[in-house]
Image (cartoon, rainbow, N blue to C red):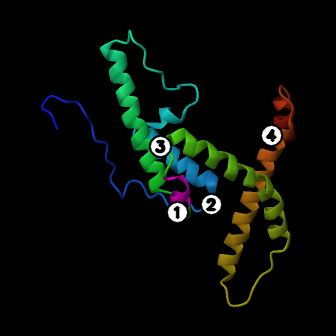
Amino acid sequence: MEPGSSTCIKMVNPEFVKLNYFDGTNYPRWKDKMMFLLTFLKIAYVLDVNHPATKPQEGDGDQIRAARAKRGEDELLCCGHILNRLSDRLFDLYSSIKSPLEIWNPLEQKYNNKKQGTYKFLTTKYFEFAMRDGISIMDQVHEMQFMFLNLKNNALSQLILMVPQGGAHHLNSLL
């Protein structure tokens, strides 16, 4: 490395970030944790479609070139962090892609669509719940409470999506 260069290596204590590998399940939780990590590293902006990368132009000054170089480094770092937390199967699928947005958007599209069927699944699971012998009653009660909270949160998000714009005050009166 050259003397006077301003390259910064961003490292995170592994105990600070306990991010599981994403294997296709529980996408919303994985996504929130990943966004927290990327925000902490100050590289989440590369996933924002409102801040696209600019094309190099002939009259660019040193400051613009430096900003473009920093964005390139941040995109590489972001891509590495996302790929690093994918399961082996998903890593093999996305490892040839060099743009973090080209990894992030397909994951978002594929696994957010699965959320739509989650409400039906949670409802069925809740109504089919039965107490079992050989398992602590408190463990089963906690399992049922967890299912109920998931169902309630999912139902609320479905209800919010169905309310027309400007009708949120009616929803608040129902809750």
Stretch of the chain drawn in magenta:
90-95
**CA gap, disc 4 and disc 1:** 32 Å
> Image height check: is 128 above or below 103?
below
Residue occupying the point 43% across, 19% down: 56
User: Could you tell me the amino acid type at mark 3?
Assistant: Lys
Mark positioned earlier in the residue sequence (4 or 1): 1
Dot 2 corresponds to which residue?
Answer: 24
Q: Quadrant of the C terminus?
A: top right
Determine the secondary structure under disc 2. loop
Checking the image for residue 160, the label placed there is 4
Residue occupying the point 65% across, 83% down: 136
Checking the image for residue 98, the label placed there is 3
Looking at the picture, tell me which residue is in the foreground, 105 or 131: 105
Within the magenta stretch, is there residue 94? Answer: yes
Query: In the figure, is residue 59 to the left or right of 124?
Result: left
User: Is residue 42 something that shows in the picture?
Assistant: no
User: Is residue 89 something that shows in the picture?
Assistant: yes
Front of the two marks 4 and 2: 2
Front of the two marks 4 and 3: 3
